[in-house]
Image: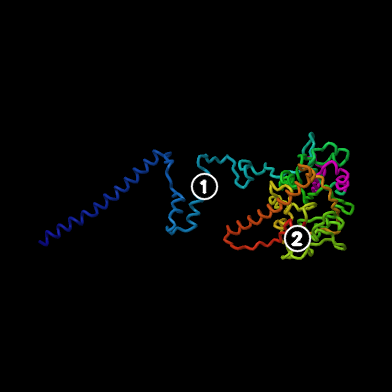
Amino acid sequence: MKIEEYKRRGTFGRRKPNECMRTIVTIIVGIVFGFFIGVSFPDISPPKLKLVPSIDAYLGDKNSGRSTQTILNVISVSRDNNSTKGRKLDPLEIFVSTNPRGAERLPPAIIASESDFYPRRLYGRPIEDLTFKPKYLVTFTVGYDQKDNVDQAVKKFSDNFTILLFHYDGRTTEWDEFEWSKRAIHISVPKQTKWWYAKRFLHPDIIAPYEFIFIWDEDLGVENFDAEEYIKLVKKHKLEISQPGLDPDSKGLTWQMTKRQEDLEVHKEAEEKPGWCTYPHLPPCAAFVEIMAPVFSREAWRCVWHLIQNDLVHGWGLDFALRKCVEPAYERIGVVDAQWIVHLGVPSLGNQGNGKAPWKGVRERCKNEWKMFQDRVLNAEKEYYKSVGVDNMVHEANWVTVDRIQ
């Protein structure tokens, strides 16, 4: 019995190496066979095959335990797949994602993303067109009836300034009686305000060459004003948003902050009526200029332009929000006392309204726009703070409503 048992065991022992060898040979044959199949069909790629699970599958199972980073990775891969789907990847095709929106297919060196108001010749070499480039821009929104006052104002600005006139009465060629008008830029759309013009024609990329931008009314007395000296003081005191001080005899003087203070070069704060300034570093006691004669640095204007609303054309209330565009506002916004102006208060644009008393309709809209702008700012801030998880944010602005200044 034992001898036969040993024989059976010996037989089994001899079979195991043979079985292992057959298994190894089978695997090698399978690999070789698969290799030849792959080589024979190199272009087969199932179009519907999804190697990355749908993001919905991840978001649908809230208890899956998958990390946020995993989900973000899925989004990233899906986005990359979608961006290249249906588009052949050609190394000769230009696509630069950091280019301005819409210009991704252009080589960066050809992109001209900014412009200017420099007139150019119709002949000669372009490089020789400009023998001098003004450093600053001044705009006036004008009607021809105020031509004499505008003429006096323009003459206070040197050749360092590009002159831009916005014509609300449609009369442009008549201004050629002034020599400076022939080198000025004229834009005419009847019955429009300077903030309507500013939003549409003073985009930051259009006026990028100018260090400072003056956006002024037409009814300003400038006997005691010199633009070049004004710029020197603005730079000296590092003001990003400013205005000349208003002579105390100015018509319609409302705010103590914009009233000229004698024996000062610049002031950045003032005392107002009781109850108007709960926060002394905020408008109208600081960080405040009026909209009649503001001056903006290039950097500040890039922000302010986005703050201007397309439909709120009078700009009332904008002066309370300018502080949002500079930091710290109570240091970077100020009034230049050494160069001052007089507000003459000529209601020429105000008379462009409709009805028996056009100015009444215009003024009513101004008041309504103030309230609308205030509400938009408050609601926008509430939405932002809510989106970042901050609740019950106390709004800090000293909003002085129209009814309180009547």
Residue at position x 62%, y 47% in the image: 98
Mark 1, residue position: 80
As drawn, the residue found furthest toward the left would be 1
As helix, strand or loop, the secondary structure at mark 1 comes to helix
* In the image, residue 176 lies in the stretch drawn in magenta: no
- Magenta stretch containing residue 143, yes or no? yes
Please report the residue visible at 63 percent of the width from the left and 55 percent of the height from the top: 379
Within 10 Å of the Cα at label 1, are there few (<14), some (14-19), or many (20+) other Cα atoms? Answer: few
Side (left or right) of 215 relative to 40: right
The x and y percentages for residue 127 are 77, 40
Picture coordinates of residue 121 (x, y %)?
Answer: 80, 36
Give, as a three-letter code, the residue at label 1: Asp
- Choose between 274 and 44: the one closer to the eye: 274
- State the quadrant of the C terminus: bottom right
Find the magenta span and give its range: 127-155
**Is 56 placed left or right of 31 in the picture?**
right
The percent position of residue 261, horizontal first and vertical second, equals: 85, 62
Q: Which residue is mark 2?
A: 284
Real-space CA distance between mark 1 and mark 2, rounded to the nearest whole angstrom: 50 Å
For badge 2, the amino acid type reads Pro
Residue most extreme to the top? 123
Q: Counting other residues with Cα less than 10 Å from the Cα at mark 2, is it few (<14), some (14-19), or many (20 or more)?
A: many
Q: Earlier in the sequence, mark 1 or mark 2?
A: 1
Report the residue at 79% width, 50% height from top.
Answer: 214
Q: Position of residue 392 (x, y in %)?
A: 60, 63
Q: In the depicted view, which residue is nearer to us: 372 or 7?
A: 372
Relative to 129, is 398 on the left or the right? left
Tell me the colour scheme of the image: rainbow
Question: Where is 353 relative to 296, above or below?
Answer: above
Q: Is residue 299 above or below residue 87?
A: below
